[in-house]
Amino acid sequence: MGTLTSILVLSFLIFFHELGHFLAARFFGVHVEVFSIGFGKKIFSKIVGNTEYCLSLIPLGGYVQMKGQDDRDPTKVSYDTDSYTTKSPWKRIIILFAGPFANFLLAFLLFIAVGTMGVTKFAPIIGKISPNSPALEAGLQENDRIVMINNELIETWDEVSMLIQKNSGSMHMKVERAGSVQTIILTPKISEYKNMFGETKQKKMIGVLPSGKTIEMVYSASELPGFAYEQTMKATTLILTSLQKLVEGVVSPKELGGIISIVQVTSEASAAGLVALFALTALISVNLGVLNLLPIPALDGGHIMFNAYEMLTKKAPSERVLTAMTSMGWVFLLSLMALSIFNDIYRLTNGN
């Protein structure tokens, strides 16, 4: 059941991405010859209007084949009025960007749904207190509930962390303890910690951890767009930072995951419930959007780069350069895919 859910999620994300390309292409009068979910041999096909809609054997992507544009053969062009080739570069860029944009839009909508159903967050209740910490010296105790910091009401632990970082001096903290409210004054100090990439960083800390107790946050209609936008931006930042750390060598290529990892985590999320599944699907959707915008030939970002070059220089890249760079792009992408699948298999066989 989990594997089926994973395949449906991936197919839905691919469909939405390609739908973005399709709608933008049709808006600018470009004829779409094929709309495919998956690559390789076509296992189902139906022609509607002048477009062939199909499901293909390998569910690792999809494509919209427009008249005059073919990644497998960049020299295959058409100069008909309904061809991709004859459209101005800025129109082509919009058509190319529409796919990743659809992924960001889908993530936003999924986060809207998540906010409606309810988000589980840590309650602002103090758990473990570090020795020699500002919290211990100020008299904070385990199970204290933080209700206010510097006159700002506190609902979740995230708000506690955020206000500690924003604070520039001493903090006035109101805590609920044994039915009464007490005021604690303390000053955070700069301490070292390990971030999610294993790097040693510094930030303001008071020396407390959350108790682990949780609350359910349900957002009202006016709050939902802000929540969804914030979560979409957080996911985008996380993925961009991860890519940066990969390039810098902070994250090992061994950490790359492929289709098997996606199936695995999606199965686990579906078992955890609809909220977890929607949140993970939104994250994968943002991931697809970001990765497709990378300036790698054969990806949307690579094509955008070629069209931007044409806009600036008033001439298209030569067929020789276009063919060579697209071929290199495919080699790079296939190598990356092979590495990620190898990593998946290695982790499975080694029990990690």
Image (cartoon, rainbow, N blue to C red):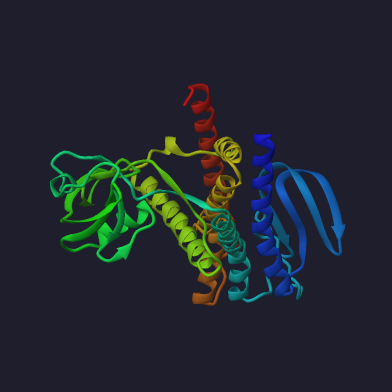
Residue at 60% from the left image edge and 37% from the top image edge: 271
In the rendered image, residue 69, in percent from the top left (x then y), is placed at 69, 62
Q: Could you tell me which residue is drawn at 61 percent across and 65 percent down?
A: 96
Left or right of 13 in this view: 185: left
Q: Is residue 51 left or right of residue 245?
A: right
Q: Residue furthest front?
A: 179
* Front position in the image: 192 or 295: 192
What percent of the width, then of the height, locates residue 239? 45, 52
> Farthest residue in the top direction?
350
Residue 158 vs residue 171: left or right?
Answer: right
> How many labels, in total?
0
Q: Residue at x 38, y 57 (%)?
A: 155
Instruction: Locate residue 298, reporting x and y percent.
Output: 58, 54
Residue 331 in which image quadrant: top right
The N terminus - image quarter: top right
- Let me know if residue 72 appears in the view: no
